[in-house]
């Protein structure tokens, strides 16, 4: 049975797991804390794979389908490993009205990937988000955490390329 | 004991139990309201919107399966508007995924098909979606074709509330919602499924079925309410 | 009274609806008394004629040729009846819509994979549409007669109503799908 | 904390405040932060030290002033001199000229006086003027006095009456009378009771609640505590979008500060009233802002709305009576208690009292966050405060109320802003988003955009919203390519009616508004697409116009 303890899941016992356990304990194994635990798990691991979800389902004594249902309902939770670099384009109203679509399609074209996807070499992910709240500076894009306001497709492309270029230099 | 509630349904005075829904009260009094996601014996979901009714004094429509009765309530179960709304609900469900009756196990014993006939849905006014979900044939006895699923969640509720396992749930959301087993595993590899078959017995369409058997033999719409009744008597 | 000009058309379908049409038995004789069959797969007429009163169309729209024919039918017909599920909603014919590159895949399956001789798609096979269309995705349809196939009784009732100049009401009388 | 301690702390802090001749408020909200406001902040601190004016000039890290397009923005008091696009270099110059020399640097000042003149700030009373991370700043301007007053001089009943008399309506969208809602919860049998502050501002293009939380978190906490006292609750939750990291951090710190100050916790102000607040993070689901979905989300489930009744007031979190208020509603409460319901109800219009915060965005010259009295006209908001559209462009439409708000044309601009008028015109108050469109925006494409948003955000529970909206989107998508005919309009309208009337929750019930209002007010644009096969704004039919990027 999925909820009977003792079974090994594929989650490696390491410092991250210890921190996850601590968070679960802090919430007193409460089923209500599922969202908080998923937040913590994603912060620690970067994304939520099935082993991790199985583990959480066992610890909180929740049916696996319930955990999976919750994890996939909310956009913020990522079930796949994101790329090394992430560009997120805001598609909130203000940004859309001011041409955010052009930024997205430029990135899609240039790196041959679709929104929500990652390049086949795993180096770049492109996400769209619904409003980061900097509407007065629309359109906005975020490249590896850095916000670019009043962005043009060229601005964003340059930023993405330089982020990826920097990593290539480091790799050498 | 809860006290009885007096209301009228289509002009007919009926007595209902306190806390009862309009649909339950109507059915107990032999009055018909079409419904789809409703299943006697498990909790109401209120999703399909086929069972909508009008209440005198309110401009809105209400899903009768989740609207509790109140004293003096005047319910209208049939009107031009309600028929129009019900038709849309059925049409949209038929258009949402590729429901091709002639090649479906449920052909002839499908609740959605029956409703379409009953409501005069002889064609669809919107384009149909041709989803291509993989059919799950991994279970030795059962099969699951998400392309025929109407997301009524009867199976989920039955699995959770009657069998007590909660193998099934929904993943994703909106039009991408899909009924899953455990962590979206193939049915045959589900570790929690007891293979009890109550989900396929409750499926109103041909999404969950028993392999090699005509659906007319598999469908047991009253099974769940029967089980629940037996349990309450114990 | 002049005879009604009646046409029946067979697009992408199995001809089952035409079989059902013929299954009206003796009623077909009555029909023959009231209507003149001006175009049909069972009559030898090449071009779809003008000024048709009632046209029954079986089958979905699967290729360019049918698409053009259907538009012509619409122009030339007073009342257009979608006969059977393929015409009404695509039905089995449209199952290929769920496949990626379904148009190429079905031809490949029929003329290459399942062919023992002369493997290859013959040139005279018309180009398939990317997506199979129900009639009402192309033209305005006046009457829908669902069923796979619709039973002869229903077809006969619908025709009767139409010949009498009434709009048929099918609610509760057909079987969807 | 004892009542006297609050008073003496307030006195001490306000004296401290007065001891400075100047106060430089550097906006460090998430509108300005990405554009270097922290560097500007430290540049100001350095400059003040450099010029030796530390004794007379205080440099504060504050929340948003509202003029977000001028990021980073800096407000110098006294006199409310607003500097725009400040850089570290400019910071030094401002200190040198304005603080030391006493001459405001005119060239850097924000020129639009109307932006402030037509506004009335109640909810945003402290925004941009206090340090949100210092609870002492809040107390210095009278913070937590209303809570003190409620706990020591008013009964819970009395608090509810006062709020009811003020006419305050829920600012989250539906406009239900706040006092009435409180009364329902107070009277509902069952305990414990819960208070939820709704900060799940998921609307694209709306950032009023975020700004409030970043600029004045204690106003929210104080409002919650007062509400809790009124309805008899000891436990509150703030449900906040996780996409708002700065708001989350600010609230976290504010809760800690309030706890250690003793305005949250046990026996507040030595009374028998105890109240504590916990943060709950959303995870990217617009529908979670719906009252019953928020409950599901806090309980760790899929945020799928459920039918009402039972209302959360009767059966909310874990089946207990629960009060759910938007944070903007709650932030009004302390002011109402201090200044009285009569004062509050004198603001705004007769049936709609008080003010409303709006996020003004789109093709408008002065986008930003504004707070205006109810009853102000849309024209004043768009043209006076917002400065109209860019030179050479023509105003086309304004959308009010977030993604499911309707679009109103020029001839409806004199409509007063209140719940009733907006609803009648096909728009909604919603979350307070105002998006201005000019002649480079295509109305068909815009309707499609918002419908797509709602398709993405539909929880999938009910047929009209899940399947119906998607069909609507597909039809609109076809329209933008000229596919379809004018005969489809009645079908679209019928489908919209079904979605509006038969959907389970507010998301579906309002989602057809963009389509319906554009069909009503901008039908000619639809006809142009379908009959003439052209897009008047030059956006559709494969033109990569992008709606006219500036």
Image (cartoon, helix red, strand yellow):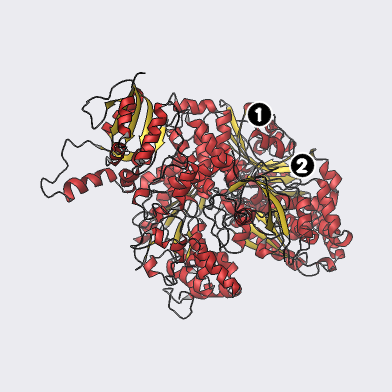
Judge from the rendering whether residue B104 lies leftward or rightward of residue D224; answer left or right. left
Percent across and percent down for residue D19 are 81, 54
Question: Residue B1 versus residue D538: which sits nearer the camera?
Answer: B1
Determine whether, in the image, residue D271 is placed left or right of residue B102.
right
Q: Position of residue D302 (x, y in %)?
A: 55, 59
Outermost residue on the left side: it is: C117
Q: Residue furthest top?
A: C1
Residue D79 - label: 2
The residue that mark 1 highlights is D412
The answer to whether one can see residue B111 in this image is: yes
Q: Earlier in the sequence, mark 1 or mark 2?
A: 2
Q: Position of residue A100 (x, y in %)?
A: 48, 41
Disc 1 element = helix
Answer with the quarter of the image where residue C154 lies: top left
Q: Quadrant of residue D430?
A: top right
Residue occupying the point 24% across, 32% down: C41
D77 left or right of C105? Answer: right
Which callout, 1 or 2, points to the residue nearer the camera?
Answer: 1
Element type where label 2 sits in the image: loop
Q: Which image quarter holds the C terminus of chain B? A: bottom right
Counting from the top left corner in percent of width and height, residue A150 is at 53, 41
In which chain is the residue bearing label 1?
Answer: D
Count of number-bearing discs: 2
Discs 1 and 2 share one subunit? yes
Q: Are marks 1 and 2 in contact (CB under 8 Å)?
A: no
Neighbor class of circle 2 (other Cα within 10 Å; few <14, some 14-19, many 20+) is few
């Amino acid at each position: 049975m999925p909820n009977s303890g003792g079974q090994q899941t594929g989650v490696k016992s390491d410092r991250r797991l210890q921190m996850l356990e601590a968070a679960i304990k802090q919430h007193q194994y409460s089923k209500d804390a599922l969202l908080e635990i998923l937040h913590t798990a994603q912060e620690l691991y970067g994304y939520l794979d099935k082993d991790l979800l199985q583990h959480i389902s066992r610890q909180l004594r929740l049916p696996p389908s319930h955990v999976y249902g919750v994890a996939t309902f909310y956009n913020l939770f990522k079930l796949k490993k994101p790329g090394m670099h992430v560009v997120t384009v805001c598609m909130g109203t203000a940004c859309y009205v001011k041409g955010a679509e052009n930024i997205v399609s430029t990135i899609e074209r240039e790196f041959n990937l679709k929104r929500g996807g990652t390049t086949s070499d795993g180096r770049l992910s492109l996400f769209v988000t619904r409003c980061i709240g900097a509407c007065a500076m629309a359109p906005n894009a975020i490249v590896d955490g850095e916000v670019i306001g009043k962005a043009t497709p060229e601005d964003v492309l340059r930023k993405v390329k330089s982020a990826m270029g920097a990593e290539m230099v480091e790799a050498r | 004991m809860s006290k009885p509630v007096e209301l009228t349904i289509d002009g007919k005075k009926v007595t209902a139990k306190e806390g009862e829904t309009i649909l339950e009260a109507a059915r107990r009094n032999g009055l018909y309201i079409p419904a789809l996601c409703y299943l006697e014996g498990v909790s109401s979901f209120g999703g399909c919107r086929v069972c909508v009714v009008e209440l005198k004094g309110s401009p809105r429509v209400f899903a009768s399966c989740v609207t509790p009765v109140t004293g003096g309530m005047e319910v209208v179960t049939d009107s031009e508007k309600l028929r129009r709304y019900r038709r849309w609900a059925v049409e949209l469900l038929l258009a949402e995924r590729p429901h091709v009756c002639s090649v479906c196990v449920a052909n002839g014993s499908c609740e959605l098909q029956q409703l379409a006939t009953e409501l005069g849905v002889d064609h669809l006014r919107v384009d149909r979606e041709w989803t291509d979900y993989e059919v799950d044939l991994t279970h030795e006895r059962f099969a699951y074709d998400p392309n025929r699923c109407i997301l009524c969640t009867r199976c989920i509720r039955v699995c959770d509330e009657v069998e007590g396992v909660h193998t099934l749930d929904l993943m994703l959301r909106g039009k991408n919602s899909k009924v899953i087993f455990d962590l979206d595993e193939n049915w045959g590899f589900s570790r929690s499924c007891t293979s009890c078959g109550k989900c396929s017995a409750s499926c109103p369409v041909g999404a969950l079925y028993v392999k090699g058997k005509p659906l007319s033999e598999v469908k047991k719409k009253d099974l769940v309410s029967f089980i629940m009744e037996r349990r309450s008597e114990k | 009274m002049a005879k009604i000009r009646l046409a029946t058309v067979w697009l992408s379908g199995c001809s089952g609806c035409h079989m059902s049409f013929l299954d009206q038995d003796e009623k077909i004789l009555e029909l023959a008394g009231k209507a003149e069959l001006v175009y049909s797969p069972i009559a030898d007429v090449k071009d779809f004629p003008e000024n048709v009163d009632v046209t029954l169309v079986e089958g979905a729209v699967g290729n360019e040729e049918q698409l053009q024919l259907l538009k012509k039918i619409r122009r030339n017909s007073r009342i257009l009846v979608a006969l059977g599920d393929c015409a009404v909603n695509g039905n089995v014919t449209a199952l290929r819509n769920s496949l990626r590159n379904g148009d190429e895949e079905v031809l490949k399956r029929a003329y290459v994979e399942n062919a023992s001789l002369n493997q290859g798609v013959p040139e005279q096979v018309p180009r398939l549409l990317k997506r199979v269309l129900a009639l009402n995705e192309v033209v305005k349809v006046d009457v829908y007669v669902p069923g796979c196939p619709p039973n002869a009784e229903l077809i006969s009732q619908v025709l009767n109503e139409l010949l009498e100049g009434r709009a048929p009401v099918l609610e509760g009388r057909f079987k969807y799908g | 904390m004892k009542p006297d301690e609050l008073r003496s702390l307030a006195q001490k802090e306000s004296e401290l405040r007065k001891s400075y001749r100047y106060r430089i408020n550097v906006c460090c909200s998430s509108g300005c932060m990405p554009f270097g406001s922290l560097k500007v902040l430290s540049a100001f601190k350095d400059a003040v030290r450099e010029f030796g004016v530390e004794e007379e000039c205080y440099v504060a890290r504050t929340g948003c002033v509202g003029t977000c397009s001028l990021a980073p923005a800096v407000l110098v008091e006294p006199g409310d001199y607003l500097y725009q696009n400040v850089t570290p270099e400019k910071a030094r110059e401002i200190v040198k000229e304005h603080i030391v020399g006493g001459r405001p640097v005119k060239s850097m000042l924000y020129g639009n006086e109307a932006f402030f003149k037509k506004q009335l700030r109640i909810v945003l009373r402290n925004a941009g003027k206090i340090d949100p991370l210092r609870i002492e700043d809040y107390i210095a301007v009278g913070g937590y006095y209303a809570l003190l007053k409620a706990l020591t001089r008013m009964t819970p009943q009395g608090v509810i009456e006062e709020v009811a008399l003020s006419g305050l309506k829920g600012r989250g969208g539906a406009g239900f009378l706040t006092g009435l809602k409180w009364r329902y919860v107070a009277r509902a049998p069952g305990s414990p009771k819960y208070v939820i502050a709704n900060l799940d501002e998921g609307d694209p293009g709306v950032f009023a609640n975020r700004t409030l939380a970043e600029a004045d978190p204690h106003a929210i906490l104080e409002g919650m505590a007062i509400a809790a006292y009124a309805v008899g609750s000891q436990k509150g939750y703030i449900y906040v979008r996780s996409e708002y990291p700065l708001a989350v951090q600010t609230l976290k710190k504010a809760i800690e500060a309030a706890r250690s100050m003793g305005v949250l916790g046990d026996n507040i102000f030595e009374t028998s009233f105890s109240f504590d607040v916990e943060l709950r993070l959303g995870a990217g689901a617009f529908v979670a802002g719906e009252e019953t979905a928020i409950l599901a989300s806090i309980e760790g489930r899929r945020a799928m709305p459920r039918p009402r009744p039972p209302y959360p007031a009767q059966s909310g979190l874990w089946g207990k009576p629960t009060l759910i208020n938007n944070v903007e509603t709650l932030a009004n409460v302390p002011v109402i208690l201090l200044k009285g319901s009569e004062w509050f109800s004198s603001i705004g219009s007769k049936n709609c009292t008080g003010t409303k915060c709006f996020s003004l965005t789109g093709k408008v010259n002065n986008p930003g966050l504004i707070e205006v009295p109810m009853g102000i006209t849309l024209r004043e908001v768009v043209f006076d405060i917002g400065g109209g559209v860019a030179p050479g462009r023509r105003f086309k439409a304004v959308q009010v109320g977030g993604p499911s708000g309707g679009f109103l044309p020029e001839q409806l601009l004199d409509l007063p802003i209140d719940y009733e008028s907006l609803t009648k015109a096909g728009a909604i108050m919603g979350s307070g988003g105002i998006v201005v469109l000019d002649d480079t925006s295509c109305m068909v494409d815009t309707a499609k955009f918002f419908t797509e948003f709602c398709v993405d955000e539909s929880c999938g529970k009910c047929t009209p919203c899940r399947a119906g909206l998607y069909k609507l989107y597909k039809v609109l998508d076809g329209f933008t390519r000229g596919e379809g005919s004018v005969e489809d309009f009645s079908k679209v309208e019928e489908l919209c009616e079904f979605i509006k009337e038969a959907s389970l929750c507010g998301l579906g019930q309002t989602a057809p508004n963009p389509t319906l209002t554009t069909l009503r007010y901008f039908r000619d644009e639809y006809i142009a697409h379908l009959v003439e096969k052209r897009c008047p704004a030059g956006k559709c039919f494969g033109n990569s116009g992008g709606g006219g990027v500036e």
